[in-house]
Image (cartoon, helix red, strand yellow):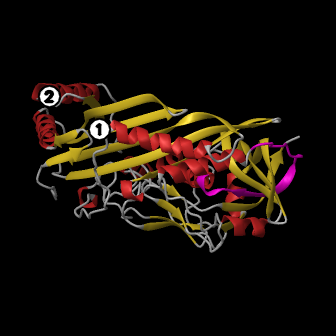
């Protein structure tokens, strides 16, 4: 069952970090838990480091360097569960954390759904997901990159009068998960990101917008100039925004905000919402909830993916699977605990989904505007007016009014409303402009009709 790599020194931003203390802390914790009578135990050790630099109007604003580590121990005694944590890997500190977890467990109620995942579900294969690309960057290099990004944004148009700044960050992290079945799973991940936000102004007022990019490998990151230019262009196009008359119109969610619709789906079919009976998609497995052309699937083994992993937060092996096929909900998103509460099997989703992707169509964003003809292009959402029990959806929005397939003018101070069940059924197209920057990956999504509250 055990599959590990020999402990080595892992290169992080500020120098090497020894992985051996993570292995030692896990071994000490699990041994002590067994000595104290725990039926089962789990420990997660992590170490990470990052460097971030931000500038504003060409001047350094902040430098943030982080270096942290932690150990979380969970123990089980006949369905009773306790957990404790420490950032100290010394033997005494680890032993004290285990004793605290056991003490907490003695005060809790027994729950038959508690416990480690079934042993046969634990991962035994650990493919290289190409998620580890550490490099060394100096503060000077990162500062220069941030300045170039902001300069590119401010150079887009004379209407850009101010800046909220640009940031460059580099982060590395390693995690080791172990349990009393003998499982050991190690993950290493890097993340690089650059972002910029600027402010534009005309006689009608000010607007701001931003852009960012994030990747596992620094070589895949858009250039600072590209990111800055995009931030500047997005800001300028929002100037002189208007209000719209209240009515019902088609709504096209731009890819960066369309991914939020996928996250609402996952919330609704997650085990916690289901066993609490607080989801509008309760008992919907096997039912048609999207049009027939919609396919939504997980890709946990996507190389350099932000959500890639060979196992979930419990060590259960991840699998590529369809969550929606031909518009039909194939199953739920479950951990070991929630699956037991529901009388089902875990889906390897403790901690969430892995590179959830909605299959794209052949049209890019400009072509989708032509498909929509007349309606609202949403580029930003605000507020959290979503009721997961009923599916009712109401959020502040801004974007652009479209006629004859062409953007006419920017709009703001709108509210878009509907019901998620209806919105899912009324998806009429998914764009090819897939946003790969996060764990939820979607192209722009066109919904045939929603209520827009404006003037």
Image position of 117 (left or right of 367): left
Element at badge 2? helix
Residue 405 versus residue 111 in the image, above or below: below
Element at badge 1? strand
Residue found 12% across the figure and 43% down from its top: 20
The answer, for residue 391, to whether it is visible in the render is no
Q: Which residue is mark 2?
A: 95
Image position of 378 (left or right of 297): right
Q: Which residue is mark 1?
A: 49
Residues shaded magenta: 239-256
Q: Position of residue 100 (x, y in %)?
A: 23, 25
Question: Mark 1: few, some, or many residues within 10 Å (few <14, many ≥20)?
Answer: many
As rendered, which of 201 and 10 lies closer to the eye?
201
As rendered, which of 171 and 360 lies closer to the eye?
171
Q: Position of residue 177 (x, y in %)?
A: 24, 46
Q: Earlier in the sequence, mark 2 or mark 1?
A: 1
Q: Position of residue 359 (x, y in %)?
A: 56, 69
Question: Mark 2: few, some, or many residues within 10 Å (few <14, many ≥20)?
Answer: some
Image quarter (top left, top right, bottom left or bottom right) of the N terminus: bottom left
């Amino acid at each position: 069952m055990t599959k590990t790599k020999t402990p080595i020194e892992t290169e992080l931003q500020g120098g090497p970090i020894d992985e051996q203390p993570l292995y030692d802390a896990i071994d000490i914790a699990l041994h002590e838990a067994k000595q104290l009578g725990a039926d089962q135990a789990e420990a997660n050790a992590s170490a990470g480091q990052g460097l971030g630099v931000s500038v504003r109007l060409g001047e350094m604003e902040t430098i943030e360097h982080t270096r942290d580590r932690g150990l979380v121990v969970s123990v089980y005694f006949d369905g009773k569960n306790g957990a404790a944590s420490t950032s100290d890997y010394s033997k005494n500190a680890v032993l004290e954390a285990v004793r605290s977890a056991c003490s907490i467990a003695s005060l809790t109620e027994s729950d038959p759904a508690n416990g480690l995942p079934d042993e046969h579900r634990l991962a035994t294969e650990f493919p290289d997901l190409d998620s580890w690309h550490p490099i060394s960057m100096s503060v000077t290099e990162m500062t220069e990159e941030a300045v170039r990004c902001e300069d590119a944004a401010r150079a887009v148009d004379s209407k850009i009068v101010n800046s909220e700044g640009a940031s460059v960050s580099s982060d590395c992290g390693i995690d080791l998960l172990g349990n009393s079945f003998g499982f050991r799973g190690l993950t290493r991940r890097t993340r690089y990101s650059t972002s910029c936000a600027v402010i534009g102004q005309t006689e009608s007022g000010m607007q701001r917008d931003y852009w960012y990019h994030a990747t596992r490998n620094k070589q895949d990151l858009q250039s600072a100039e590209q990111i800055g230019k995009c931030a500047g262009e997005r800001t300028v196009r929002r100037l002189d925004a208007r209000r719209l008359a209240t009515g019902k119109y088609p709504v096209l969610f731009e890819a960066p905000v369309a991914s939020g619709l996928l996250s609402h789906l996952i919330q609704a079919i997650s085990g916690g919402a289901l066993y609490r009976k607080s989801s509008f998609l309760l008992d919907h497995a096997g039912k048609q909830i999207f049009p027939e052309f919609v396919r939504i699937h997980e890709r946990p083994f996507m190389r350099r993916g932000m959500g890639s992993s060979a196992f979930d937060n419990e060590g259960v092996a991840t699998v590529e699977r369809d969550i929606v096929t031909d518009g039909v909900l194939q199953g739920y998103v479950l951990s070991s605990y929630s699956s037991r509460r529901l009388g089902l099997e875990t889906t390897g989703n403790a901690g969430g989904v892995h590179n959830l992707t909605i299959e794209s169509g052949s049209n890019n964003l400009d072509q989708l505007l032509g498909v929509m003809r007349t309606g609202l292009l949403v580029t930003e959402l605000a507020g959290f007016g979503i009721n997961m029990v009923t599916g009712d959806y109401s959020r502040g929005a801004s974007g652009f009014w479209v006629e004859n397939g062409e953007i006419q003018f920017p709009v703001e101070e709108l509210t878009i409303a509907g019901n998620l069940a209806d919105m899912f059924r009324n998806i009429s197209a998914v764009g090819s402009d897939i946003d790969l920057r996060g764990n939820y990956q979607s192209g722009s999504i066109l919904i045939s009709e929603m209520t827009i509250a404006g003037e």
